[in-house]
Image (cartoon, rainbow, N blue to C red):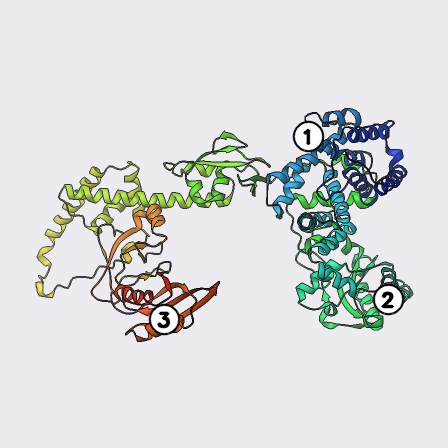
Amino acid sequence: MLSFTDTERNKALQIIESLRQRVGNALLPGDEEKVRQILFDAIDKNKVNRDVFGLNPLLMAIQTAYIAVEEIGLRRDGLIATLLQPLVAESLKDAEGVLTVDRIEKDFGAGVAVIIRGLHKVQDLYKRTPVIETENFRNLLLSFAEDMRVILIMIADRVNVMREIRDTENREAQLRVAEEASYLYAPLAHKLGLYKLKSELEDLSLKYIEHDAYYHIREKLSATKAARDKYIEDFIGPIQQRLEALGLHFHIKGRTKSIHSIWQKMKKQKCPFEGVFDLFAIRIILDSAIEKEKMECWQVYSVITDMYQPNPKRLRDWLSVPKSNGYESLHITVLGPEKKWVEVQIRTERMDEIAEKGLAAHWRYKGVKSGGGMDEWLAAIRTALEAGDDMQVMDSFRRDLYEDEVFVFTPKGEIRKFPAGATVLDFAYHIHSRIGNQCVGAKVNGRNVSMRSVLHSGDTVEITTSSTQRPKHEWLSFVKSSHAKSKIRLALKESQAKDGLYAKELLERRFKNRKVEMDDSLMQQLIKKMGYKEVSDFYVAIANEQLDTLTVIDRYMELKNSSCATSSSSSEVNVPRSAAGFVMREVDTAASSKDGVGSYSSDVLVIDRNLKGLDYTLARCCNPIYGDDVFGFVTVSGGIKVHRVDCPNATELRKRFGYRVVPARWSGKSGGQYAISLQVTGNDDIGIVNNIISIISKEDNITMRNIQIDSNDGIFRGIITVLLDDTARLSSLAKKIRNIKGIKLVTRL
């Protein structure tokens, strides 16, 4: 049974009294008594246990509630939801729990129930995905929360946890909590303008994750906070007097950079603590008319630089030329009293408003990502927080976001972002183009749906495929993402090319069956006479059975006979030529395959280094050499890549682009030397490398280009690159290396 220690009891009573003073007038009659009774019932029935850190969950809830009320400004609904949330969490694990969401709604109203539901939806989201250090997870978290007070309570809870786990022995859990605070909760607090909580989260995260760095900087900042604040006051005082004497209207903010901020600067600038210029930062905000803004900002600059020595390398003039995101300000770094560097930012009220709440808000230009309507919505929330109004205004903020985006899960719990209206097919193409091409449907949240089904945030999608499925033109009408559309168009184009090649082969067979020899130039004329602008369109029409091959042959014969008749009538004026004077034109094989398909299927590619007129290269993925069994692959540009038959990519190339694979063989003798790599493994004996090098050096026409050596736990591993003529030389060399004492394995890469 959970029991409070004396320390815990005293702390709880003190916080409860403070809460009563803060929000007592906002509570409804009977609220306090109902909450107290629920807490006592939970303790009596042993429904609450200490967490992984050994902390009392009820005391933690009371402390979190105080942070939410004191630091954030939540009132009645947020307070009650924070106090009761741990009890509901335990009840969900136990069918006989003491508290349900329905009971909360009945006793405390819909506002409290909405927050409780949001908190548990977020907890469920944590369980569903193992990858939470992403912007997508942060946005989906906001989407699931429904009520913004859920996020505010979560931030308060994480601040409280970070404060309390200082002395825990569970180091692994401490690091996990600290990392989540750093990349998830601190940016959220920053976006919402909760700068004090954001800085505390970052500092505590650094303390747990980078313990040595944290204490190193803290020791360097040996002066007390009061002493540092006094320094800022001493720095500001003379400036304030001079500016007031000039009749300027302004106010000044001064602060000391947080330990986390100092550490980030040290890492970014790769410098020690002493190399960080701006440990102190001052912001001077002028109340100026728009037409006088620049003049008065430079006037303040002149006053400051007259009083303190500036660092010209640290001048940042975003007054004359604002940043692309609209940010305007004048930054200078000056040498203040005690030879300490101080950063001064000079801007007007309008500029400050833009920097804090507009498109160039501080959290944006520091690199914290966000997108779309999320910016405006969070800015509205932050405005309500800064106004200090009764936080009942939060009731008006419901999740009406992501009109343009949806976030869905893969079966492994990874989050993917899509445009609103995206379908199952969009998801399939996002995973892989092959998955998209073969998609026939999916299971969404365990239920079978079609590929046209529209996705919603939070869906878990598992794609169903079929090897017989092929992309269709109609798919373009219902996919939303540009990625999916481009992949479908590419697949259709490849399919069209494959169909065109099939149609061409079919037509050639029909010509042979009719014992008619096809003349390419005559066929080109026929294609144009039949109204086709592109040859590919002609063959696609045959493949789609829009054009009959017999009709094509008949039209071809008519054109041929007509051509022969014309040729016969003009033969009288032709001068006969001797056969000895006829020179056969060399066929430009590369030119005939510029469409990426070609007609190699009936020929064998002969590889000869002296061969001219053929654009071929040896593939780098398998590095074929003379003597290897090889094949050619027609690339999109019309050239040919030569691969080994056992190339790692061979299976995929034959499977996906079989129509572009051509047989190949080597011609005559080797025409030069080829680079190959051998991986050698063996015992790490003294002299083994020298023995290998000695054997290679004794071989004729074999040149060593490179050798990489690695030794670990008595095992020697090396990669040797050599130049040699052919596979016979390679086999001989590999055999000799294997015979070296201590060598266990020699393989070609």
The residue pinned by badge 1 equals 92
Residue closest to the eye, 574 or 689: 689
Q: Residues within 10 Å of mark 1 (few under 14, many from 20)?
A: some
Q: Where on the picture, by quarter, is residue 343?
A: bottom right
Residue 593, percent from left and from top: 29, 54
Against 36, is 493 above or below?
A: below
**Residue 186, position as x, y percentages in the image:** 71, 50
- Mark closer to the chain start, 2 or 3: 2
| Residue identified by numbered label 3 | 692
The residues tagged by marks 1 and 2 sit, at their Cα atoms, a distance apart of: 57 Å
User: Could you tell me the amino acid type at mark 2?
Assistant: Phe
Mark number, residue 271: none
Q: Residues within 10 Å of mark 2 (few under 14, many from 20)?
A: some
Residue 392 visible at all: yes
For the N terminus, the image quarter is top right
Identity of the amino acid at label 3? Ile
Give whichever of 313, 292 is nearer the camera.
Answer: 313
Amino acid beneath label 1? Leu
In the picture, measured across the screen, residue 141 lies left or right of residue 723, that is: right
- 306 left or right, relative to 719: right
Q: Earlier in the sequence, mark 3 or mark 1?
A: 1
Left or right: where 677 falls relative to 327 = left
CA distance separating discs 2 and 3? 72 Å
Which mark lies nearer to you, 1 or 2?
Answer: 1
Query: Residue beneath label 2, please?
Result: 235
